Amino acid sequence: MREIGAFEAKNTLGTLLDLVEHGEEVVITRRGKRVARLVPEARTKDRDGMRAAAERIRARAEAESGPSISVDEWKSYRDEGRA
């Protein structure tokens, strides 16, 4: 882990980002006190894979649910028999 002062960090931000991108952590200090930490972004799951899975779920739900009914039809069934 590398420590760097705020003034130097401001002037070398691009270089610091390169270091972080390659897995290094950088602590930024102000007057000798730690105030911030630059860390590599945690890798999230594959967003494209998640979107594809959601689409497959939606397609399967539509195929298994049968014909869909409109809101007006649903309201008429709900209100049927009410006086």
Image: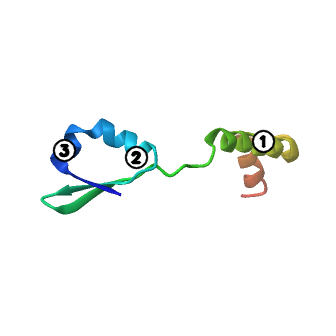
Residue shown at the point (28%, 39%) measured from the top left: 13
* Left or right of 12 on screen, residue 26: right
Which residue sits furthest top? 14
Report x, y in % for residue 62. 81, 42
User: Which residue, given by chain and number where applicable, does mark 2 sit on?
Assistant: 20
Tag 3 near tag 1, CB within 8 Å: no
Residue shown at the point (78%, 41%) measured from the top left: 56
* Left or right of 18 on screen, residue 47: right
Q: Amino acid at mark 1?
A: Arg
Mark 2–mark 1 distance (CA, rounded to whole Å): 36 Å
Report x, y in % for residue 10. 21, 41
Report x, y in % for residue 43. 54, 49
Place residue 8 in its image quadrant: top left
Which residue sits furthest left? 31
Report x, y in % for residue 57. 77, 46
What is the crowding at mark 1: few (fewer than 14 residues within 10 Å), some, or many (at least 20)?
few
Badge 3 or badge 1: first in the primary sequence: 3
Q: In this rendering, which labeled residue sits more in front, label 3 or label 1?
A: 3
User: Which residue, given by chain and number where applicable, does mark 1 sit on?
Assistant: 56
Q: Nearer the viewer, residue 56 or 49?
A: 49
Q: Amino acid at mark 2?
A: Val
Residue shown at the point (78%, 53%) measured from the top left: 80
Q: Secondary structure at mark 3?
A: helix
Q: In this rendering, which labeled residue sits more in front, label 2 or label 1?
A: 2
User: Which residue, given by chain and number where applicable, does mark 3 sit on?
Assistant: 8
